[in-house]
Amino acid sequence: EWLYPAASFGSAKEGGGVEFNFGATQFVHEPPKGFLALDPAYINLPPVSPFPRLFAFMDCCHALLSSGPLPPFCRETAEVGTDKSLREGPQVVELVVLDGRPRVDGLEVSATNFSSVRGNAKVKRGRWYYEVLLRSDAMVQIGWCSDAFVPDAARNKGVGDDEGSWAFDGCRLLLRWNKTHKPWGKKPWKEADVVGCLLNLDDYEMQFSVNGKLLKDNDGDPIAFRDFQEYASGGLYPAASFDQENTCLFNFGASELLFKPHSYESIGIPSPLYQSIEKYYLNNPAGPPASGDDASPSATASSSKGGPSARATFEQDCAIVQYAARLCEQQHKNVYNVTIAGNAKLATELNLAHLTPDDIAWRFAQLRQFNQVFRMMHGFINLANLGTGPQVGPLVEMLQRIKPLLFPSVVLDVLRANLQLSNRSADHVKITINRRKAIRHKLDPSKDSTAKHSLFGQIHSLLGAKPPAFFRTSKRLWSVVFAGEGADDVGGPYRESLAGLCAELMSGATPLFLPSPNQRHNVGAQRDKWTLNPAANKPLHFSMLTFLGRLMGGCVRGGEPLPLYITSDVWKSIVGDTVTVADLEHVDKTLMQSMNIFASLDKQGVTEEVFADCLDANFTTILSDGTEVELIPNGRDVPVTFHNRHAYVDLVLKARLHESAAQLDALAKGFHSVIPHHVLSVLTWQQLEVLVCGKPDFDLDDLRATVRYEGISPSDIRVQYLWQVLAEFTPQEKALFVRFISGRERLPVRLKVMPLHTKDDPDTYLPGASTCFFWISLPQYSSVAVMRQKLLYAIHNCVDIDADYRVRDFDDDAPPTVGVSEGNDDDEFEDYSHLL
């Protein structure tokens, strides 16, 4: 049986009707993965056709790996229009988060709390238009804002709530500006409606439409706002604010606008890069050059400027990507609006001092274009083939080689898109655990080799048998009750339970990890790291490691950093990179030094006779846990000689590199059951470590940038004391401070500072904190010295959470418990692009 597309219609009002699109032109939204358009012509429509993208990606990769110039389509193109008095910003408009914690996937915004966003292009003159598709019956304020707009998510202040922004709220049928509201429109908008935003800066008028029909007041006037030039002299951005649980898709012109008026221009345009690629390959009468051939553009193209930097090495390109990522982090910007030149100190640190600022900026622009090519292409790459050995095709192999040249924000977009496709809803469980038992266990772990009374052991006993699907969620994995403590879990106790179990794993309270030899001997790199214990080889240990891997994957999905200090070989194994002797040196530098000396004895003048007289060794080695193992059968009976010493060195390095292979396999197996290996394969191991753990240290400016003050002024002496004390803290003390106010040891944390009113001498009080809401309350201390003393005591000693309610008597010997919570936990995925 053949099926045909079909539809039935009732009577239509005059001017009504529908329009069908079977694929002869672009869809408003790309078809779901795995589905084809009915009209086969769709495959050749830009930006759908994969073939120009494929050629462009392969040619760019060949050029980058061979240190050649990139193809000409990777040159930065001019902005829309040459007159900056009309418009400023990139051609392809992207969204910038102004406030709140929305999830931004391309041009789709989903709000988990009150949030505000705007486009990264502004207009100064002319007539401009953009559209918003409502994904829900959206409580959204859509419109425009100036540089003076200052949102405040804590007070639900968004677009249209100050004199620097104008909005239409179609759910409440209100125009909003500077705290004034005016009824507008007759019928509330609904899911799937398309809202049009019209801005006439020649006459200073704003209008709004729904599904192409202009909205009007009761007198038939379609002008929503007029004569606002006093507040818009510097230009206006497209902007919107969202209540929680609302989703919208913006269209600035990258795809066809459905209802654009003839006299208006779209703020953005379809990707100029794709247009250049299409022109280069499809308009070439000889056909696209063969990828990798001498005639390919990567071999023949020459840059229009940049001189020697046109042939930057692969290592230089990697350094420029790191340079740009660090600047994005410092400036709190993305790669499209970051100021790239002028940081000589950072350039020197990354071995880029020999390049001029113009050279770096020019090469960065080309690398940014390459990342755009990857964005276009990655949806056509079968990532499931990554890491599958000889079956890997040339496209996947090329991706593995060039992934250090992908900007962290690009990698995170790919990761997030894949995770969202596999997120699941699971029962939200509530667990009861006893932290006092855990503290007693930590004081003497030798009394319980199973670590069943540790926090990790208690949680493992409750949730270790949960299937991988339980961890595939963007929400909190559990809520927690601490036995004997008065804490309501709205986020803080959950984060505290995670921080507590991580502290145990990194302390010897469980049998899974050991201090690395570098840590024990205080030599080499990674002296703060812990390595997997090769003696953790019992079924319970493997079950714990698999559970830990699943927990790590679940916390990545949920945006909760875990303060784990693990050696690089673990992260490399999870992401699929090869573990080398360089990683072993980061774990045990003393061993590597001795093996290097041992292998080069002849160059130091040591003869066979001297070797025999001075060295009495056999084919055994000592593992990280102190266990002696034979390197070959009966190795204790086989002496090491001058002639077989190289074989001995190779066997020692192999044994030490793979001493915890079974433990690594169990941990990685758990992680990959929650986040598939192929999804992780676009990450470097360093990016994976930051994604799982967050940043081990943070710049105080990062915390200052997000701080809120309630009932206290930023100029208050208590606030000044606080910043002075924090500036003097060590990285460990800063981590404890973040844990004190949030229950986690890593950023992101959006601190709120409040006053603590006291009846008696303020110097006798400790500061207060809420780990659920990230606030700290400060007494009126008499000096910075008192502030430092009290704060240090609090972060080191105030562990119990007991300010939420009064605790009744409890049974200290009661076992941990788990139950299904009827409440709905709305904590969603947090954006960590600024951490990578």
Image (cartoon, helix red, strand yellow):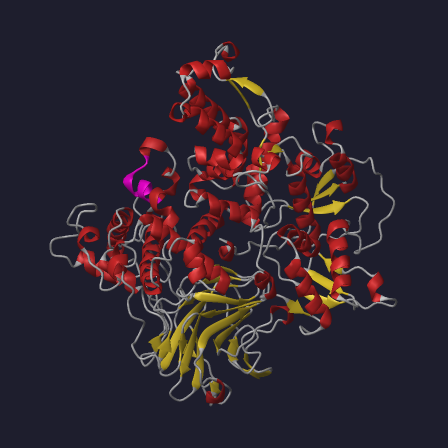
Nearest the viewer among 220 and 113 is 113
Q: Is residue 831 visible?
A: yes
Residue at 75% in and 34% down: 441
The answer to whether 98 is drawn above or below residue 85 in the figure is: above
Measured from the top left, where is residue 80 in percent x and y?
Answer: 31, 73
Quarter of the image for residue 788 reads bottom right
Task: Say left or right for 292 vs 526.
Answer: left
* Residue 593 belongs to the span the image colors magenta: no
The answer to whether 57 is drawn above or below residue 253 in the figure is: above
Measured from the top left, where is residue 815 in percent x and y?
Answer: 77, 35
Q: Is residue 13 visible?
A: no
Task: Say left or right for 504 vs 164.
Answer: right
Measured from the top left, where is residue 672 in percent x and y?
Answer: 50, 37
Measured from the top left, where is residue 181 in percent x and y?
Answer: 58, 82
Quarter of the image for residue 45 reads bottom left
The answer to whether 817 is drawn above or below residue 148 in the figure is: above
Q: In terms of secondary structure, what is the magenta stretch mainly?
A: helix
Nearest the viewer among 772 and 709 is 709
What segment is highlighted magenta in the picture? 392-399
Nearest the viewer among 236 and 425 is 236
Circle count: 0
The answer to whether 135 is drawn above or below residue 820 in the figure is: below
